[in-house]
Image (cartoon, helix red, strand yellow):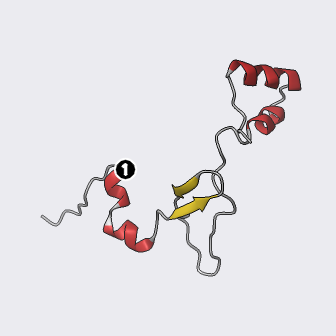
Amino acid sequence: ADVPVMPMHDLESLLEDPHMVATGVFPVIDHPTEGRIRSMTPSARWSETKVEPSRLAPRLGEHSVEILQEAGFSTEEIAAMLREGAARAAQA
């Protein structure tokens, strides 16, 4: 019928797709606080510039306070949000 087709993946089978495995799209990396985690390589490619992640994924709440400050919330408002569970700060 000359119709292009390919398998429909779920999250588990995508990690095992032969092309994804061969091209190293989902490497497992060592995170300094979270242990071994699966990452994803950048999808963009350029002929002369290698694309590398500049940092690891942030921990839950790692930037909450800074983002709330940039959004204009006061120190007292942020403290209340953290206390009441509306926001979370990363655990040290």
Residue 74 appears in view: no
Q: Secondary structure at mark 1?
A: helix
Q: Residues within 10 Å of mark 1 (few under 14, many from 20)?
A: few
What residue lies at 86% left-to-right and 21% top-to-bottom? 76
Q: Position of residue 40 (x, y in %)?
A: 52, 60
Q: Is residue 53 above or below residue 45?
A: above
**Extreme residue in the left direction:** 1
Disc 1: which residue? 11
Which quadrant holds the C terminus?
top right
Q: Position of residue 39 (x, y in %)?
A: 53, 58
The one nearer the camera, 5 or 26, is 26
What residue lies at 45% left-to-right and 70% top-to-bottom? 24
Q: Amino acid at mark 1?
A: Leu
What residue lies at 23% left-to-right and 61% top-to-bottom? 5
Q: Is residue 16 above or below residue 64?
A: below
Q: Quick check: 85 left or right of 15?
A: right
Q: Position of residue 10 (x, y in %)?
A: 32, 49
**Extreme residue in the bottom direction:** 48
Q: Quick check: 1 left or right of 82?
A: left
What residue lies at 57% left-to-right and 55% top-to-bottom? 35
Residue 82 appears in view: yes
Image quadrant in which you'd find residue 59 = top right
Image quadrant in which you'd find residue 46 = bottom right
The one nearer the camera, 11 or 50, is 11
Q: Position of residue 15 (x, y in %)?
A: 37, 59
